[in-house]
Image: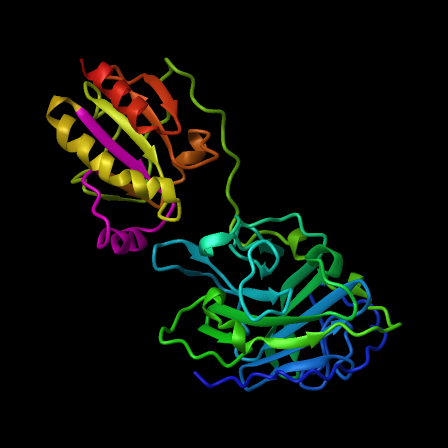
């Protein structure tokens, strides 16, 4: 990977009026070597980074901060897979050191992300908390932004654009903020950042970027106005991966939907509720990214070992791929059946993880809940007796 040189000068170029509106998906476009996308003026922007991999520029008026990154090597919006088997596509992150103090300030700084997951397109953000924790991904920003592929001369390149309302981040004219940009792609596979950070790992995330390297950007007074309406609202894009609509949860006393998965781990033959009739079956819906799910795995291992001979069978389901789950199992064994690549959670009406369903020996649903260890143990013991 080529090194990226940080640009930390404090000179801010004057802003010009934005040009006319362009379509969200360009049929024709300017050569981005000599122009910016979405009607922004290349000469009016402040260039923060210019390398063979990445160009990052910033503009502002008295209402918005606009940051645009051009990834010269990425001309494909194909999806890849995380190491734990989740679909992932192109995404970008703008990290803002809002108070400019060269460190992560809880509840003040922000990280804005474009297309954090294929199911949630457009501009999202997180707020840092204490102890290096962060909020969940929030979608209520009044800003806008998108990732687009654009023809530039004979090439197709990727353009990430962020529109951040100054009021939303608590910034005012006259203030200096600090920022860094990271772009990642799965097809082709690469990660690049605007501040020259060199990671020891081929895959890394924006949280790894040192605050000391961030670009300084002064919000100087200007009478110019940016035409941010020319920048597409990516939240209106069709998700690259669409999750179906959950059906109503099966009622207690009913025969629940049959077991389905693309692949099975720890099973010689695919299990079915019919083949498991006469046993007590605990169905566990989980994911590797779900902290409580992972924390509960050792206890489920204990339950399967303790009650397996008495008639308990635990079957778990995730929509992640078999390859990804096999990678996970190298770190955390699961001593019960695991169904991978499964969409069964939709049939069971699951909208949050973890969630368990307890099926009796007659094949009918007895109970379901977000699992709490003491209650789960009590329910299983009572049914087995």
Q: Which residue sits at x=24%, y=21%?
A: 380
In front: 343, or 232?
232
Q: Which residue sits at x=61%, y=71%?
A: 179
Q: Indicate whether 381 appears above or below 158.
A: above
Q: Position of residue 64 (x, y in %)?
A: 76, 64
Q: Residue furthest front?
A: 101
In front: 132, or 376?
132
Q: Quadrant of residue 20?
A: bottom right
Q: Indicate whether 215 appears above or below 205.
A: below
Q: Position of residue 335 (x, y in %)?
A: 18, 40
Q: Which residue sits at x=51%, y=84%?
A: 4
Q: Quadrant of residue 27?
A: bottom right
Q: Position of residue 208 (x, y in %)?
A: 45, 68
Residue 273 in sight here: no
Judge from the rendering whether residue 348 lies leftward or rightward of residue 321; answer left or right. right
Q: Indicate whether 75 appears above or below 300.
A: below
Judge from the rendering whether residue 206 lies leftward or rightward of residue 371; answer left or right. right
Q: Which residues are magenta?
A: 312-336
């Amino acid at each position: 990977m080529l090194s990226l040189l940080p640009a930390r000068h404090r000179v801010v170029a004057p802003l010009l009026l934005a040009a006319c509106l362009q379509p969200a998906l360009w049929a024709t476009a300017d050569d981005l070597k000599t122009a910016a996308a979405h009607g922004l003026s290349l000469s009016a922007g402040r260039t923060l980074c210019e390398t063979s991999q990445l160009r990052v520029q910033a503009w502002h008026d008295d209402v918005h901060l606009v940051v645009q990154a051009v990834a010269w090597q990425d001309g494909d919006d194909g999806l890849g897979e995380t190491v734990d088997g989740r679909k992932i596509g192109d995404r970008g992150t703008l990290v803002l050191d809002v108070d400019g103090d060269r460190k992560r300030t809880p509840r003040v700084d922000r990280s804005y992300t474009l297309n954090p997951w294929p199911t949630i397109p457009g501009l999202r953000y997180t707020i840092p908390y204490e102890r290096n924790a962060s909020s969940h991904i929030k979608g209520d920003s009044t800003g806008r932004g998108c990732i687009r592929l654009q023809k530039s001369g004979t090439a197709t390149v990727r353009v990430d654009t962020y529109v951040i309302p100054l009021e939303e981040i608590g910034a005012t004219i006259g203030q200096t903020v600090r920022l860094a940009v990271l772009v990642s792609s799965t097809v082709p596979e690469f990660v690049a950042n605007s501040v020259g950070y060199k990671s020891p790992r081929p895959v890394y995330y924006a949280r790894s970027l040192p605050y000391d390297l961030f670009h300084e950007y002064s919000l100087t007074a200007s009478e110019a106005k940016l035409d941010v309406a020319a920048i597409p609202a990516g939240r209106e894009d069709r998700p690259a991966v669409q999750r179906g609509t959950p059906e109503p949860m099966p009622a207690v006393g009913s025969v629940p939907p049959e077991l389905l998965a693309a692949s099975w781990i720890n099973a010689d033959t695919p299990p079915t509720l019919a083949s498991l009739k006469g046993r007590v079956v605990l169905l566990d819906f989980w994911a590797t990214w779900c902290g409580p799910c992972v924390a509960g795995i050792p206890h489920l291992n204990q339950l399967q070992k303790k009650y397996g001979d008495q008639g308990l069978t635990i079957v778990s389901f995730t929509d992640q791929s078999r390859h990804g789950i096999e990678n996970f199992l190298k770190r955390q064994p699961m001593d019960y059946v695991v169904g991978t690549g499964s969409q069964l959670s939709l049939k069971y009406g699951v909208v949050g993880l973890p969630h368990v369903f307890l099926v009796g020996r007659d094949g009918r649903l007895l109970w379901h809940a977000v699992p709490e260890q003491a209650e789960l143990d009590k329910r299983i013991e009572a049914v087995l007796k």
